[in-house]
């Protein structure tokens, strides 16, 4: 039985708060996993046991969910998690080159960092975990990367190295959009549904454009040229007859 003492009264109270938000306790599993990740920087076996105990699930059921979603990390992570999009569009625009550059820049003794490896001691200030990611839903602004799930758009290998070096010096470069940069543990707490004490101030910093010029370029072109979408038919067109054999 793993040692659950790392989950103190404050975390138990937060778990109860989460469970109370749902009609069935098991529905709280996803935010609960973010909660335990905010404590240890990953979902350990103790974290799995804690969730199972709180939600009356088996550890097998919890583990099945943890291993399905890539946002739950099974080994200790750095203060910051860098996710480089290497899906098709970002890859051809430079995402592969950015990932390879960071692998080498963060590697040690000539060995490049591998997916989900950490440069530095996990959990300590300035430590960085690197991963390649599937499409981050910002193809119009690619190549993109995220630090603790905050976006840095239109990156190059040089800008990504500069960003990483700033993080290692303890700086918190401002993301291109969205919320201010925190740490992986802090953002895990937010993903669980708990925001900083001074939420009003926090929210005023969060506001940002939801669509960039690139995002609406197609819609703008259509508006400028007077293009409109064809009217939707009342009924779907009839399917062609299929000859029966
Ligand atoms: S391919 Fe990178 S954000 Fe979509």
Image: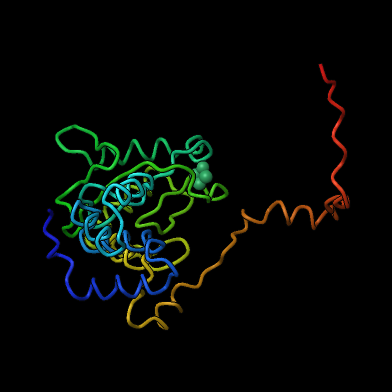
**Quadrant that contains the C terminus:** top right
- The spot of residue 189 in percent (x, y) is 32, 67
Residue 78 in percent (x, y) is at 22, 53
Q: Coloring scheme of the render?
A: rainbow
Decide if residue 148 is on the left or right side of residue 36: right
Quadrant in the rendering for residue 192: bottom left
- Residue 168 can be seen, yes or no: no
162 to the left or right of 122: right
Q: Is residue 139 left or right of residue 94?
A: right
From the viewer's perspective, is residue 92 above or below residue 171?
A: above
Image mark count: 0
Q: Residue at x 35, y 55 (%)?
A: 147
Q: Residue at x 43, y 70 (%)?
A: 22
> Is residue 8 shown above or below 80?
below
Relative to the observer, which residue lies in front, 157 or 222? 222
The reply to whether residue 91 is visible in this rendering is: yes
Q: Which residue: 39% across, 57% down?
A: 149
Residue 136 at x, y percent in the picture: 48, 49
Q: Of all residues shown, which one is farthest toward the top?
A: 245
The percent coordinates of residue 195 (x first, y second) are: 36, 74
Q: Residue at x 86, y 30 (%)?
A: 240
């Amino acid at each position: 039985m793993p040692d659950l003492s790392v989950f103190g009264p404050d975390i138990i109270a937060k778990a109860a708060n989460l469970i109370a938000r749902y009609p069935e306790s098991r529905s709280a599993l996803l935010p609960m996993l973010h909660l335990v990740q905010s404590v240890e920087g990953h979902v350990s076996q103790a974290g799995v046991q804690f969730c199972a105990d709180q939600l009356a699930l088996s550890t097998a059921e919890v583990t099945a969910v943890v291993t399905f979603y890539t946002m739950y990390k099974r080994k200790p992570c750095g203060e910051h998690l860098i996710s480089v999009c290497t899906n098709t569009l970002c890859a051809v625009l430079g995402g592969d080159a950015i990932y390879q550059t960071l692998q080498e820049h963060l590697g040690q003794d000539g060995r490049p960092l591998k997916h989900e490896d950490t440069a530095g001691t996990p959990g300590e200030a300035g430590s960085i975990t690197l991963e390649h990611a599937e499409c981050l839903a910002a193809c119009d602004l690619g190549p993109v990367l995220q630090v603790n799930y905050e976006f840095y758009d239109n990156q190059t290998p040089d800008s990504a190295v500069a960003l990483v070096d700033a993080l290692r010096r303890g700086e918190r470069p401002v993301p291109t959009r969205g919320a201010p940069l925190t740490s992986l543990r802090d953002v895990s707490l937010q993903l669980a549904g708990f925001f900083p004490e001074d939420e009003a101030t926090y929210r005023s910093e969060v506001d940002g454009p939801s669509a960039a010029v690139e995002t609406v370029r197609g819609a703008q072109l259509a508006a400028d040229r007077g293009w409109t979408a064809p009217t939707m038919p009342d009924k779907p067109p009839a399917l062609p007859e299929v000859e029966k054999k």
